[in-house]
Image (cartoon, rainbow, N blue to C red):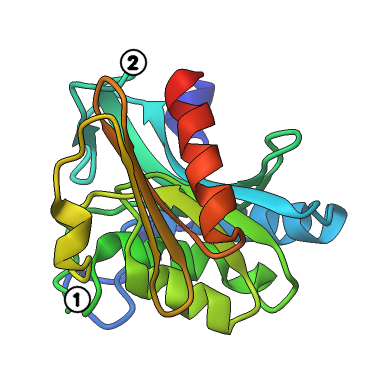
Amino acid sequence: ELSQFLHFANSHLTPPRGSENYDRLYKVRSILSPVLTNSQEAYYPGKNLAVDEEMIAFKGRQEFRQYMPAKPTKYGIKVWMIADSSNGYVLNYDVYLGRDGKKRIHGLGYDVVTSTVKPYMNKNHHVYFDNFFSSPILLEHLSMQQTCACSIVRCNHKGMPQSAKQNLLGQENSFRLKRAIFAKWHDKRNVAFLSSNVSPGEASRTVKRRVKG
């Protein structure tokens, strides 16, 4: 009965679908926003931050419920998050509401990282994320905002040079882009990453340690 009758907003005042003020999270927005504000005011993170997705298990009827078969939690609500790498403290989050029809010039991953990291830009933080988000133009943008970044990357991603797509057998490949270093190493498989906070030599050594580890 508690869950049945617990409300955080007046359902009769819900903006109609299709209107300018329509919000799929209207019924819980009144608690999501202050929780986020208080979380950011209560704690300031260290240097290293991580951006990733989190699935909140949910099997009920919901228009933005996601199905991700490769995840331990296959059905649920996807939330983009940025956290302090040293302790997992969540600093910023955004509930993924599905396709919204917005024109994304550089892709969803770019928009997610830039929006979640925005409160911590221009403060010399180091941000880490996986290849879903990674792209040369993203690292360039972060670097211009005094924010270093490091991530694994798909070599066939838009914006990657042709030399990054070459297959390697027992050798390495590294070179400098505009504001980042690309490094690739082949052991049992190809591993490639972009970084804006290491030199080419350090990049190669980091890739080897990652593969062997």
Percent x, y of residue 124: 73, 70
Question: Eyeballing the image, is 201 above or below 87?
Answer: below
Report if residue 30 is visible in the image.
no
Identified at 24% across, 49% down, the residue is 154
Q: Residues within 10 Å of mark 2 (few under 14, many from 20)?
A: few
84 relative position to 67: left or right: right
Quadrant location of residue 22? bottom left
The total number of labels drawn is 2
Give residue 51's position: percent from left, percent from top. Answer: 51, 49
The residue to which callout 1 is attached is 102
Q: Going 18% across and 21% down the picture, which residue do you hit?
A: 69
* Image: 146 above or below 188: below
The residue singled out by tag 2 in the image is 72
Q: Amino acid at mark 1?
A: Lys
**Rendered residue at 77%/56% (across/down):** 38
Secondary structure, mark 2, is: loop
Pointers 1 and 2 in contact (C-beta within 8 Å): no
Secondary structure under badge 1? loop
Q: Which mark is residue 61?
A: none
Q: Amino acid at mark 2?
A: Pro
